[in-house]
Image: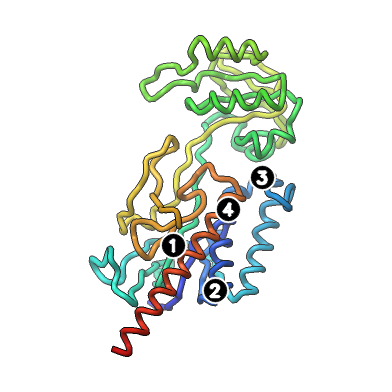
Amino acid sequence: MTKTDWDAIVIGGGAAGLSAAQALGRSLRRTLVLDGGAPRNRFAAHMHNVLGLDGTPPLELLDRGRAEAEGYGVEFRAAQVRAVRDTVEGAGSPQPVGGSVSVELESGEVLTTRALVAATGVTDVLPEIAGLAERWGRSVLHCPYCHGWEVRGTRIAVVTTSPMGLHQAKLLRQWSDDVTVFTEGLVDAEGSSVLDADTERGLRARGVRLVPAPVEEVVGSGSQVSAVRTSDGQEFAIDAVFTGFAMVPQDGFLSELALDRSDTPMGAFIAVDTMQRTSHPRVWAAGNIVSPAATVPLVMGAGTMAGAAVNAALVDEDYALAAAEVV
């Protein structure tokens, strides 16, 4: 196994990882990005609410970001990571000056780095409803702020999968006066409905149609939705479907570090401080891996913060190493 030393390794080549890498490259840090090649928003044709880049295809943004980072000396490899470990057994925190962590690839190769940024995002686990997954990112959507403008004034369905679907349903009435909410998923962990009488009255007063029957199929042609069919055989003419899903952080490769986690309404995610540092002094995390609902501008900002924070930590360590040599 070959060991290669880096100032920083960034795992994940999406918007967060590229932003971290760019900040590190501009700081003259020897930086490697390990990219699995499956960004979360690859299913979307365009991204929105990104100032100055509204309507840009997500993959185009990543191509541009990668080229910019390479211009600052950042290196890239297509690779999957198996595990991140301390190079000194039981090192934990505090770390010895001049220490490192190791990154084992699925190939078996081991790399070492003074600092690591995890930016691998989440996996979206969609509801198991026929016809839904193949239209994901086209006419089956999740974020009103990302896609509401494009489907304004059309027939919108909300297929609820959790209590958070109620918030989604309320929001979407802003973009259309023809909203149908399939309410089966509006139950808490104990199975009790979160759709109380006052909320239901408010939705109906705003012209929102409520359908209690379970959704059986999303009907359409190609990537376009045309109807939602329920288990009782009814069909509702629909132009766009919004739904919720489970967001599973892609952080299994960090499990051996036993990082602190935070419980959120969307699940347990790695805990970070305001500088994106985890409970391990050589590991930072940025983007959807720690903030699953964050949009592209937010994960870009978090990535830049992580990159700058890594450089600042390495600057302090460089001074400590230099001082130790003259004693």
* CA–CA distance in space, label 4 to label 2: 25 Å
- Residue at 44% across / 21% down in the picture? 187
Q: Which residue is mark 1?
A: 81
Q: Amino acid at mark 2?
A: Ser
The secondary element bearing badge 2 is classed as: loop
For the residues labelled 4 and 1, say whether their Cβ atoms are less than 8 Å apart. Answer: no
Q: CA distance from mark 3 to mark 4?
A: 10 Å
Q: Return the disc, 3 or 4, that comes first in the chain's sequence.
A: 4
- Mark nearer the N terminus (3 vs 2): 2
Gap between marks 3 and 2 measured at Cα: 32 Å
State which mark lies toward you, 3 or 2. 2
Q: Quadrant of residue 240?
A: top right
Type of amino acid under label 1: Val
Above or below, 258 relative to 49: below
- Name which quarter of the figure residue 139 lies in: top right
Residue lying furthest left in this view?
Answer: 90
Label of residue 44 in the image:
3
Where does the image place residue 21, in percent across and percent down from the top left? Answer: 55, 66
- The percent position of residue 172, horizontal first and vertical second, equals 65, 26
Q: Which residue is mark 2?
A: 27
Judged from the image, the secondary structure of the residue bearing numbered disc 1 is strand
Tag 3's secondary structure? loop
Mark 2 or mark 1: name the one nearer the start of the chain. Answer: 2
Q: Specify few, some or many for label 3: CA neighbours under 10 Å numbering under 14, 14-19, or 20 or more.
A: some
In the picture, the disc for residue 39 is 4
